Image (cartoon, rainbow, N blue to C red):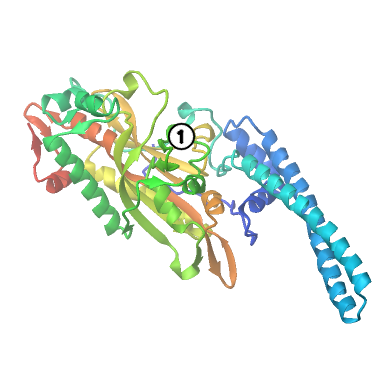
Amino acid sequence: MDDGSMMIESCNTQQQTSNTQQQMLQVQFLRNNKERVLEGLKKRQFRHLDLVDEAIATDEQRKKIQFELDSQLSEINKISKEIGMLMKEGKKEEAEASKSKTAQYKELSKELQSQLEIKEKALLDILYQIPNIPNELVKNGASADDNEIIYQSHDVEGLGEGAIPHWELAKKYNLIDFELGVKIAGAGFPVYLGKGARLQRALVQYFLDKNVDAGYVEVNPPHVVNEASGYGTGQLPDKEGQMYHIGLDDLYLIPTAEVPVTNLYRDVLLDEKDLPIKNTAFSQCYRREAGSYGAHVRGLNRLHQFEKVEIVRIEKPENSYAVLEEMVDHIKEILEDLELPYRVLRLCGGDTGFASAMTYDFEVWSAAQEKWLEVSSVSNFETFQANRLKCRYKADGKSQLVHTLNGSAMALPRIMAALLENNQTEDGIKLPKKIAEYAKFDLIN
């Protein structure tokens, strides 16, 4: 392992353009960087490489229709001016003939406009299926087994000998009732009780305070979003099956506060002096997690509803990778305060999320289960989300896309599981000093 000083190399992957149409900007990037795009998609194990050529070809068709439409509109304007001159000169018959010609051009223009809209939608549908291009430092790999461990805080060998799992501790000390949650809503919706509920609340408050002290502005966003918001941050169409959809209102329950908070800046032109933007938010998170069954999802390991505190950054492109390092250090500080053994991994291409250019995962050691549990992801999306959101900033009279970043600081369920399992003693569960100050008790017995 290294000494924990994670120096993340910068790479030149910014997309620079003043085009205001998000789909045109994306396809321009695909066209101008095709070799790099294909290499990056292969690194992700992305199977539909043909979509790149399909997008470029569809854009060429779109441009051809646009050219024809522009020509028709130009001709209509030219004839309209001629009609005005003919009318002034008293040449009524010639003017009427020109009007007839204009009507034909207008009818053709309507047809071309319709074709253009169909082609633009087709292009957008293709582009929405192409994930972000990984940073050059992201390694080729197919799954979590190929992720790079870049830092580990403790040697975990021998930790937790004789420890019992958190779901048994929760029952023993009446902290969480999983069966009552099943009665009310179904599996994956636990009910926190007594000191369990108070510990949850203490953790949320500590995480928020820690983030605010680091300069993040707290916001309290809605817990439902519209379709545009889902597309803006990349949850749609990629994670549609994992999101709870409210059909009557066509809204989605949020899978993370990242979605509403980042969408605060959708269709916004920021001034350079507005940057950086640092937000933090607490929310309930809702995930269907279709197909998640078995022992590995027992207890708090995987839930349909859980609490999480998120951090979101809006940055100038040249600063985003230094900021990613800063965010990683911030999460490390939190885990140090929690006194939990943890490690940091840089995800390989095949395990990196659809919208991310680079992601670092944080895992804590589960003493009773004797395995690592993911508790946070910190990601740099570069311009991928900003492009969809149309979020730009203006500097020196020019506008360009921002970079967006976010991270979990922190997700509650597996933190709670690790705290219970790693701190069990003969007398009860001894809380870390920092959390005991927030919970107003230091022992669960």
Q: Residue at x 77, y 50 (%)?
A: 111
Where residue 24 sits in the image (x, y, percent)? Answer: 67, 52
Q: Amino acid at mark 1?
A: Glu
Q: Residue at x 63, y 45 (%)?
A: 124
Front-most of 344 and 13? Answer: 13
Q: Quadrant where the N terminus lies?
A: top left
Q: Residue at x 88, y 61 (%)?
A: 101
Occupied quadrant, residue 427 = top left
Where residue 370 sits in the image (x, y, percent)? Answer: 28, 23
Q: Is residue 157 left or right of residue 231?
A: left
Front-most of 299 and 96? Answer: 96
Q: Residue furthest bottom?
A: 89
Give SS at disc 1.
Answer: strand
Whether 271 is drawn above or below 359: the answer is below
Occupied quadrant, residue 213 = bottom left
Would residue 63 be visible to someone looking at this image? Answer: no
Front-most of 310 and 229? Answer: 229
Q: Quadrant where the C terminus lies?
A: top left
Q: Residue at x 33, y 58 (%)?
A: 216
Occupied quadrant, residue 170 = top left
Which residue is the site of mark 1?
148
Q: Is residue 118 left or right of residue 268?
A: right
Where residue 179 sits in the image (x, y, percent)? Answer: 21, 23
- Judge the density around disc 1: few (<14), some (14-19), many (≥20) Cα neighbours within 10 Å: some
Where residue 220 sits in the image (x, y, percent)? Answer: 31, 54
Q: Is residue 115 left or right of residue 306?
A: right
Whether 436 is drawn above or below 214: the answer is above
Would residue 330 be visible to someone looking at this image? Answer: yes
Front-most of 14 and 235? Answer: 235
Whether 246 is drawn above or below 114: the answer is above
